[in-house]
């Protein structure tokens, strides 16, 4: 949370939206993020429509949800109160099985795919056939609902799927820094 505030300032100057990935499904943490002015939250390990519905209650103000209003957001002059995007992550075999149900929950704006956990859950490595097929099926499922589909990449074969996605987390900061420094010395 302490890191998000300065990042929000930098992103605002650059005209960029901010989508933090939450550590858990905790409703209070999601409420604080939205009060701070993020444009949406990515929530890990969502496996059912019921879990997704609980996240909708956490992020939306009544009557759509149960979030209490936080003064911070109003003080920041944010006018679209309650309109942060909710992007549950599909990253397990169970979540994959319920991807259509999760995507169609009212108040869910789209699905964010976690290919690394999904690979482990499917018993394969990132880039291998089972996970690539699973990713394609989630993309197609979410597309048919008209909602947003995003994914973390971090590898060229996953990044190659970017044209099929609306939102891409290209890499982690640590990994990008490491590659950049390595290139300097190559
Ligand atoms: C995963 O691939 O499991 C992720 O959580 C990426 O963000
Ligand atoms: Mg993950």
Image (tube, rainbow, N blue to C red):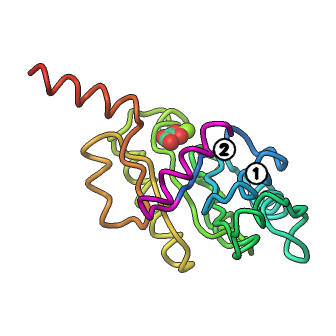
Name the residue tied to disc 1: 30
Query: Is 4 included in the stretch rendered in magenta?
Result: yes
**Which range of residues does the magenta coloring cover?**
1-17
Is there any visible trace of residue 118 in the rendered image?
Answer: no
Name the residue tied to disc 2: 22
Q: Is residue 123 left or right of residue 156?
A: right
Q: Residue at x 50, y 32 (%)?
A: 120
Q: CA distance from mark 2 to mark 1?
A: 7 Å
Query: Circle 1 sits in a helix, a strand or a loop, which is it?
Result: helix
Quarter of the picture containing the C terminus is top left
Q: Which image quarter: residue 154?
A: top left
Q: Is residue 79 left or right of residue 122?
A: right
Of 179 and 163, the residue lying toward us: 179
Q: Residue at x 37, y 50 (%)?
A: 132
Q: Position of residue 31 (x, y in %)?
A: 80, 54
Q: Residue at x 69, y 69 (%)?
A: 78
Q: Position of residue 149 (x, y in %)?
A: 49, 65
Quarter of the picture containing the N terminus is top right
Magenta: main secondary structure equals helix
Q: Position of residue 8 (x, y in %)?
A: 56, 52
């Amino acid at each position: 949370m302490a890191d998000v505030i300065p990042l929000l300032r930098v992103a605002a100057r650059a005209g960029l939206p901010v989508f933090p990935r939450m550590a858990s499904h905790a409703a209070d943490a999601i409420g604080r993020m939205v009060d701070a002015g993020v444009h949406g939250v990515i929530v890990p390990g969502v496996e059912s429509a019921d879990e997704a519905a609980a996240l909708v209650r956490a992020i939306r103000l009544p009557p759509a949800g149960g979030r209490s209003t936080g003064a911070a957001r109003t003080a920041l002059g944010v006018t679209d109160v309650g309109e942060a995007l909710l992007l549950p992550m599909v990253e397990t075999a169970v979540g994959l099985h319920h991807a259509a149900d999760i995507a169609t929950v009212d108040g869910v704006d789209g699905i964010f795919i976690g290919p690394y956990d999904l690979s482990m859950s499917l018993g394969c490595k990132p880039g291998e056939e089972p996970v690539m097929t699973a990713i394609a099926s989630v993309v197609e499922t979410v597309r048919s609902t008209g909602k947003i589909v995003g994914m973390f990449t971090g590898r060229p074969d996953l990044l190659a799927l970017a044209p099929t996605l609306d939102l891409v987390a290209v890499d982690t900061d640590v990994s990008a820094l490491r590659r950049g420094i390595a290139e300097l010395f190559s």
